[in-house]
Amino acid sequence: MADEVKFPVEATHIMMFARSVADDNPIYYDEEYAKTTEVGHIIAPPTFPRAVAQFDPDYFLRPKVGQKWFGSGKNATGLTEPAKSSGGLHAEQHFEYHRQPKPGDVYTVTTKPGKTWEKTSARAGKLTFTETIQEYRDQNGELVVTSRGVGVKTERPVEQK
Amino acid sequence: MALSASKIKVGDTHEEVVIEDLSRTQLVMYAGTSGDYNPLHSDDLYTKEIAGYPGVFAHGMLSMGLTGKMLTNYVGDGRLKKYGVRFTNQVWPGDSLTAKATVVDIREEDGDKVVDLELATVNQDGKTVVTGTATARVDA
């Protein structure tokens, strides 16, 4: 992630995000219904903050115009010298909510590296864990969400039993 | 409806089937909204031939999102203070997942009554794919 990303929260994005996690709770799309709830307005599902990736200009897991993509096209990968690693997997994710994210919020999301550690796994060889801490502050500078993610790079694909 | 501290006790559980026969299309939907277009989740050719997996698998964050649906259905909308998980096994197309919350504590925090929950999501074979914890504000 870029060190600082602007993340405008929009109702349509929340609606589509809720669909993508198979959650049809009307508080995620129906403004009239949301007004009748304790919260009083549309909110975002708990894992929505990670959708900040959409707004990161450098996000490496999004194909970019004019650049080679490592996924398949004509061949299994668009790269001529594919990376040996399958890339990282997500190991842990933790959110702390200081208030509920809602449409109209504009976050400034700052990303800081956390700890790094290693472990050996019978199923995937050497594992390298990397922690990332993100803070989501709204247009008034108030902290809305704190996120701690842990990624893992595996020495080989995780063996399936 | 939100939970009331007076109506729950340590050891109470709530469980829901959060997805049945997970489709590849659902994975594509999640890629589209989250912005995580890693080919591991939509591109079978790449995933088999380059990454060395049997086929595409779900984003960890999709498993967390599905588990989150059970959680917000249980504690009520806008009540979560903390939600964290570990991804313990991959989730594959065709999987059906059941997410479960167990009450481990009911206490006060910053003047609010809160409940601490332990979370576990299992697939159709009983294999745990997500473990986690959550804290939510509850009524008195």
Image (tube, rainbow, N blue to C red):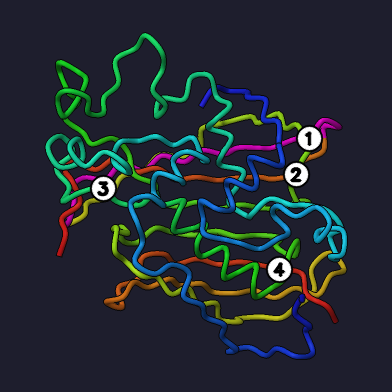
Please tell me whether residue B134 is drawn above or below residue B39 in the rendered image.
Answer: below
Span highlighted in magenta in the image: A123-141
Q: Earlier in the sequence, mark 4 or mark 3?
A: 3
- Nearer the observer: mark 3 or 2; the answer is 3
- Assign a secondary structure to mark 2: strand
Which residue matches tag 4?
A: B136
Question: Could you tell me how far apart the alpha carbons at marks 1 and 3 are, in whole angstroms?
Answer: 36 Å
Tell whether label 1 touches label 2 (CB within 8 Å).
yes
Q: Name the image quarter holding the N terminus of chain B.
A: bottom right
What residue type is disc 2 on?
Answer: Val
What residue type is disc 1 on?
Answer: Asp
Q: Is the residue at mark 1 from the same chain as the one at mark 3? A: no
- Disc number for residue A138: 1
| Other residues around mark 4 within 10 Å, as few (<14) / some (14–19) / many (≥20) | many
Q: In the image shown, does A101 or A95 lie closer to the viewer?
A: A101
Which residue matches tag 3?
A: B56
Say if the magenta span includes residue A129: yes
Question: Could you tell me how far apart the alpha carbons at marks 4 and 3 are, in whole angstroms?
Answer: 34 Å
| Other residues around mark 1 within 10 Å, as few (<14) / some (14–19) / many (≥20) | many
Question: Could you tell me how far apart the alpha carbons at marks 4 and 1 are, in whole angstroms?
Answer: 22 Å
Which residue matches tag 2?
A: A144
Question: Could you tell me how far apart the alpha carbons at marks 3 and 2 are, in whole angstroms?
Answer: 34 Å
Q: Earlier in the sequence, mark 2 or mark 1?
A: 1
Q: Residue at 28%, 35% (x, y): give it.
A: A87
- Assign a secondary structure to mark 1: loop
